Image (cartoon, rainbow, N blue to C red):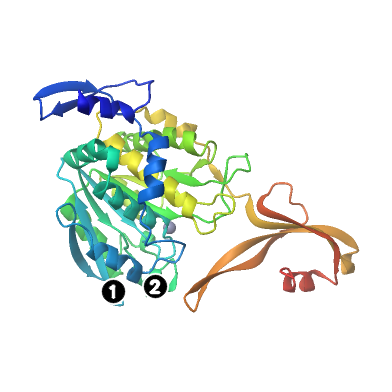
Amino acid sequence: MHNCLLYFLFTNVNISATYLVYNRKHLFVYICNVKKINLQKIEEWYRLHKEEALAGRWIPLATIEPIINALDSSIFNVKELGFSSQNRPIYKVSLGHGKRHILIWSQMHGNESTGTKAVFDFFRFIKEPGEFSDLVQQLLEKCTITVIPMLNPDGAQVYTRVNADNIDLNRDVIDRKAPESDILHKVLNEVQPEYCFNLHDQRTIFTVGNTKQTATLSFLAPSIDVSREVTEGRKKTMRVIAAINETMQELIPGRVGRYTDEFYPTATGDNFEKAGHHTILIEAGHQIDDYEREHVRYYNFIALLQGITYLASDIEFSHESYFDIPNNTKFFVDVIYTNIFIESEQKTTSVATVFKEELKDGELHFIEEIQDIEDLDLYAANTIVDKKGIRTANLETLKKNINS
Ligand SMILES: [Zn+2]
């Protein structure tokens, strides 16, 4: 019963479906339940084992290459897929030997690194699972997982969304003008994944429905055409997101959002979904004061792990609970300054600002820009600063001196 008991450790009590576990040692078949990862135990594991070599927002290729090179070759198969526009290598890391093929890519937008950190945490989980070794064995037996940890190393180097030729790789799936898009296309054809995870970061501005809560993670099961029809394929994508969301509501209740599903004819996810690869978009977002996205990195890791755990089980979620996730709204700002007196208009007002990230001399800076003035009731903010009636000559001087 050893295996079976361990499985119960990371399942919840209210289990609705069953999963067969073949115990090789005793040649028995047990019926066990695998539904959700045990969040308390996984948090302990995470504190001790996450990939410590990665931190913060700016993750260029040079920071992940040594980790890739040190991956245990008895578990991970590393291959150089080709080169970016500026001749930086793009790597693929494969693991597992199961029938269910999963393709994961991160940092197709160079300045969106949270998914990359989560992917390397996942590698750590596979390598050193501790008490989760049965789960890891199950994942490796059920799934073959291919990961491109950094699709856009040129963008990552200079902290831009686009590649070195100013191409948005997430809008280049049809034209494939960028060499990086060709590489992704080639891997897609080789792997023929049943499921894909498309890992991104979203801006701080997103909120969940009308709650004023930050959208700490957002998801999308993309449409395959303008009709936005909920096809059988999309239902499969939605089920994975529903499974992840159930866990996320325990971890970050009310802080999960859903993107609207208008069809983007040149977007990667929409076209992969259309071609029959069920593509889950995960967008890592903001949580109060987490500008380095180190907390969100953990949630992103859990989302990925829960999604893969779900895909390695024989449990089927209802796709309908996908629609319980509220749509994203855009009512979050970084700072609200209250109580500023503008002399030219003879009135007291409030100002909302958002941060723009800029990489200078190897350091990331957050530059404040005015987003809105006056009627700010709609907004929630990371920080509220009472300027105590400070006087400013006019709007121009206000904009110039917003930081002082
Ligand atoms: Zn993105």
Q: Quadrant of ligand 1?
A: bottom left
Q: Which residue is mark 1?
A: 88
Q: Is residue 35 above or below residue 374?
A: above
Q: Does any atom of ligand 1 lie closer than 8 Å to the CB of label 2? A: no
Q: Residue at x 48, y 46 (%)?
A: 217
Question: Residue 378: percent from the left, percent from the top?
Answer: 70, 46
Q: CA distance from mark 1 to mark 2?
A: 10 Å
Q: Which residue is mark 2?
A: 157
Residue 345 shown left or right of residue 57 in the figure: right
Which amino acid does the dot numbered 2 rest on? Gln
Question: Residue 251: percent from the left, percent from the top?
Answer: 48, 37
- SS at circle 1: loop
Q: Do the residues under discs 1 and 2 have CB atoms within 8 angstroms? A: yes
- SS at circle 2: helix
Q: As rendered, which of 246 and 397 lies closer to the eye?
A: 246
Residue 142 shown left or right of residue 152 in the figure: left
Q: As rendered, which of 329 and 197 lies closer to the eye?
A: 197
Return the mark for residue 385: none
Q: Residue furthest right?
A: 346
Question: Residue 175: percent from the left, percent from the top?
Answer: 30, 64
Decide: few, some or many residues near mark 1? Use Cα within 10 Å; few <14, some 14-19, many ≥20: some
Decide: few, some or many residues near mark 2? Use Cα within 10 Å; few <14, some 14-19, many ≥20: many
Q: How many marks?
A: 2
Q: Is residue 396 visible?
A: yes
